[in-house]
Image: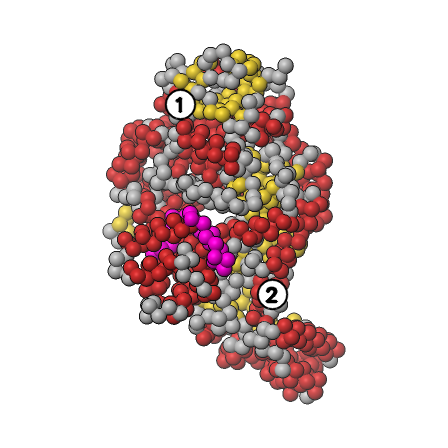
Amino acid sequence: MPKTPLSTYRVQLRSEFGFDDAAAIAGYLADLGVSHLYSSPYLQAARGSTHGYDVVDPTRVNEDLGGEVAHARLCRTLGENGLGQVLDIVPNHMAVTEESERRNAWWWDVLENGAASRYAAYFDVDWSSPQARLRDTVLLPILGDHYGRVLEAGELKLVRRGGRFEIHYHEHRMPVAPRSLDALVAEAARRCGSPDLAFIADALGQLPPATLTDRESIARRHRDKEVLAGQMARLAEERPEMARALDETVAAINRDADRLDELLQRQNYRPAFWRTAGQELDYRRFFDVHTLIGLRMEDERVFADTHALVLRWLREGVLDGVRIDHPDGLRDPEEYLERLRDEAPEAWVVVEKILEPGEPLRASWPVEGTTGYDFLARAGGLLVDPAGEGPLTDLYAELTGETSDWPERVREKKLLVLGDLLASDVNRLAEVFLEVCERHRRHRDYTRFELRQAIREVVAVFPVYRTYARAELGEIAELDRRYAGEAIEAAKAHRPDLSADLFDFFRDLLTLEVRGEVESELVMRFQQLTGPAMAKGVEDTAFYSFHRLVALNEVGGSPGEWGLSVEELHRLSADSERLWPRAMLSTSTHDTKRSEDVRARISLLSEIPERWGEAARRWFARNGKHRRSCQGEDLPDRNAEYLLYQTLAGAWPISADRAAAYMEKAAREAKVHTSWTRTNPEYEAALRGFVNGVLDDPEFVADLEAFVVPLVEPGRINSLAQTLLKLAAPGVPDFYQGTEIWDLSLVDPDNRRPVDYDLRRRLLGRLKAGMTPEQVLAGMDEGLPKLWTIHQGLHLRRARPEAFAAGYEPLRVSGPRAGHAAAFARGGEVAVVVPRLPLRLGGNWRDTTVELPPGRWRNELTGEEADGGEGPLPVAGLLARFPVALLARVRV
């Protein structure tokens, strides 16, 4: 049985908050009631990493966080405070930084030795590119301009380091292939008349070429190049004239662009303009980040070498569990998870699997569940008023002119990123598709263009992140057949100009009706493309361009799905208890677009569409003076302006600097007027000017505050409701750093700002000293009610873990306001009652009642007791002294 945490607390480690800083809050977390610290990745990452997902060495602890010694102190301190530990790990990719001091040694070896590297099979590189210029060559899109211009400007430099040579480009470092040094060393030998250098030059030229990848050639190449580099370093150190000759030759090459170009043409990599990454990259990345290269985790050696340290920690009890980042990027997630489970049978394993509405987590995966995005959508959906959908849909169209056709928006944005950011991935897949077609005479005449179009269209309408066919084994689930079939039919409908036979053939391939070695490769690669297209096209683009109600624009949810009823909550919760009772439950994470408290307040707009519409229309009219006219267009666009108003309503009070930074990021993500790769300074200046202008406008700010003030307390009630749902629902509640009190953060980096733990300690100390519910509520602005709810909930979980381990029973709520409450019991020992839609409720429960199971029940948030099983209890009475109720059966 896995060592399931009772709760987790996520910290984002970075150089400013390292192992010792995390150790310093261990006592506070224990007092709060947390059972496990949940850390962001902390294996050795690239220098200056702010998140840890750019690992360069999985065999070492991150030095920037304090290294092994500080890590040991953290682990010891956690143990002394009765806390376990869960670690976020990154199996899909590594960072390929070329900095000398913090480089990826495996990748450096690949650049030096190409396909003959001992580590060539570790990375998902296409060494057989159909383009002759990229065959057996890695494209490095690192240059700020076209290669020739950079070369002729003298920005690429050859540098000697002892007996080895490197190419430097600003902060980038690249090794020179040993075999390509023969002419350089021969010239140096002539300059100083050294037969020793001449011998080394001849020997370098005799090294096996990088295209020879048999075991004997690789071993010989590695052995001989190391010997030759050592000899050259020794000669250069002992004989100054030889060092001088080598350096003079290097200087001569650097002065001659043609000679440097000739040397660069002999390398196993091709430095290129950074924009080429979108179209021609020959390796799989993490989404569109070309500095994060995909790992071939299906190779047992890769798994063993990347997981050795983490597995040791799991065996030794340093870790109790792991969070698996982006499993959908792996070629075969189930194979990976099975291997991990075999090596760590007692580990608590959760996966960052993003499920689309209605999509189940695969029951065959040996994990405890997801990291909780599905719960986030469930809890947040309960706060949205279904009656607001029509009015807010009409309002969105009226104010912005935008359509509310979410599926079409998704298709449009996925096509956008497939044609730009992910075009190289599409091109690589199209080459495999072309090879497949060549093997089937009825389809061999399709062109690359047609195949690329078919791929793009099917991916653009694919209904989920990916399917999980195991093509080499001939295994495919019926659900995956359905998803593929739906996508093919939708693509056909959108593109009748493309051959229906081509789409049908594509379906037969994806559903394994047509099989073969290359056919299997197509299916497996296709499955690794649909996820990045969903992530970049939907979460990082469509979510930032569709603003009907932005509380719904969150990972794991869908802006096209409007809210959740109490009955649906109970059904989904019962399913979770039956299928995934130990999954993680989240409401805020490092990846959420808005914090739980911001979303809780914005959700209120669904209850007051008329009032919101009046305010938004007024603001659009009033703030026209802050817009800029450029080439006949008023900037910023009205869609962005509507996003700003919802953001201000949800996150107020917020500084102009934070609001402007958020809006700039949102605009770049939307990719309409500006983007990360093609910034539009004029538009961004207009956007910043508008944000600063409206927030420096006293009349607007007064109007905004007058609108927001009545929403603050109901928004906090919403927040308390979803917090208590998380504490009591089936699963393991996770708390993102700092969110134990009110937190009005937006997307990263806003949600990674330093947390004031001294403040939180003081607040918790006041609560532990003894306070009445009225005193707790009097500290509403400080966040005391949220902290109190979490403290009491976590300590109840510690006291009665068996109650939260099994059983989910919806409790009957009756009366005229029954739709405003959700109530359920866990394990016959704990019961929860939370309100919803507080604005329409207006605090008036009328005759609404709830039926508790038999027994005497104590409200852990107020100390009051009530008898269950003897008739319905008034909800108004249960919630009279505190906005939510957490009840525990009184044990005799």
Q: Quadrant of residue 564?
A: top left
Provide the residue designation for mark 2: 119
Mark 2 vs 1, N-terminal side:
2
Determine the secondary structure under disc 2: loop
Residue that appears at 49% across and 51% down = 328
In the rendered image, residue 791, in percent from the top left (x then y), is placed at 59, 27
Q: Nearer the viewer, residue 517 or 6?
A: 517
At a point 45% along the width and 55% down the height, the residue shown is: 527
Res 627 seen here: no
The amino acid sitting under disc 2 is Tyr
Task: Tell me residue 291's x, y (percent).
Answer: 52, 59
- Asked if 102 appears above or below 25 in the picture, the reply is below
Identify the main secondary structure in magenta.
loop
- Provide residue 724's location: percent of width, then percent of height: 51, 27
Considering every residue shown, the one lying at the far top of the view is: 870
Range drawn in magenta? 457-479
- Density class for disc 1 (Cα within 10 Å; few <14, some 14-19, many ≥20) is many
- Residue linked to disc 1: 820
